Amino acid sequence: MKDRVRAIAPATVANIGPGFDVLGLALDGPYDQVEAERTEDGLVTLVDITGDDGALPRSAQDNCVGAAAQAVLTTFGGPGAGVRLWLHKGLPPGSGLGSSAASSVAAAVATAAVICPEVAAPGLLDATREGERLATGSPHPDNVAPSLLGGLVACVVREQGRVEALSLPVAEGLVIVTASPEMQIPTEESRAVMPDRYGLEDVVANMSRVAGLVSGFASGDLDRIGSCLQDRLATPYRKELIPGFESVMQAAMEAGAVGGGISGAGPTLFAVTDARRKGAAVGAAMVEAFAAVGLPSVARVSPIDARGARLVGPDWTPGD
Ligand code: HSE
């Protein structure tokens, strides 16, 4: 067992249109990094955070990395086991790319590596959800699960709120374009605009599209993916929080995307396409459409990260 390690965890697109709180996929960048060092003081200590411009809570008790690491210690640590943590942010917080999830996952994986290396990634899912609970007020699993396991993941709800994460097949060559406008929407706020109850027709529409989407990702049938991304549970309410939603999505389609929607709780919007070059054009079109409503934004073109969170060497750089 090593005394000090570094873990990375990828950004994610949660929901993927109709799969609210159920579906998520991992993006090949950006990544958060957490270093963990084993101690014998029984404590979780957050030593430093870089890359967040001072925005995130500095104490381990108030930061999702502390909550995730504490959950690993509580579940798997022996007497006196403790950990010191360093968080290096690569993801923009509050953007809808699963920033708190990536931090929580990197913290859980790094902590497990110095405390209980025998525990495999799926065994850390509950601990990562504790980080999400602290950061967003809800332990939804659809960011942490794909960030932990990589690829496309379905979060299957079991008894008493337990969740089983199922890795689903994904065809080669799909590209996800994200455009993140310069604004933040706290997940809590984005969840608060949704109704408590839904009509049967809306629920059935979403369930049918989730089934179609899973089939489309497995076969790589872009048209099927595109036709199954529409969402009737969250998007009709959340789009009001994102200036330019309709025009940005339309610009993405005109530039070659097959469909898209809100990434997680937003405000990042995502689009699906199949070639890096087309991806760049889609990203540029989305940025231009956001600019037209006065919002600067950053586009990223990412393949799906099939590997998920992992330990890396001290010299790791994005792209490795
Ligand atoms: N499923 C969650 C939501 C993801 O949409 O609120 C948050 O990133």
Image (cartoon, helix red, strand yellow):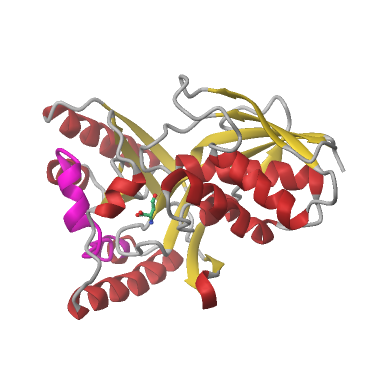
Across and down, in percent, residue 313 comes to: 73, 31
Quadrant of the image for the C terminus?
top right
Indicate left or right for 118 with 318 as reference: right
Is residue 232 magenta-colored?
yes
Query: Splitting the image into 4 quarters, where does residue 93 fall?
Result: top left
Foreground residue, 79 or 180? 79
Residue 259 visible (yes or no): no
Q: Is residue 18 above or below residue 80?
A: below
Q: Is residue 286 above or below residue 264?
A: above
Report the magenta residues as a range: 225-245
Indicate left or right for 105 with 140 as reference: right
Across and down, in percent, residue 88 comes to: 58, 27
The residue lying at 54 percent from left, 54 percent from top is 129
The residue lying at 43 percent from left, 67 percent from top is 219
The residue lying at 60 percent from left, 45 percent from top is 67
Across and down, in percent, residue 158 comes to: 52, 76
Number of numbered discs on residues:
0
Foreground residue, 223 or 147? 147
Indicate left or right for 156 with 203 as reference: right
Quadrant of the image for the N terminus?
top right
Is residue 299 magenta-colored?
no
Residue 292 visible (yes or no): yes
The residue lying at 12 percent from left, 30 percent from top is 293
Foreground residue, 287 or 2? 2
Across and down, in percent, residue 225 comes to: 32, 63
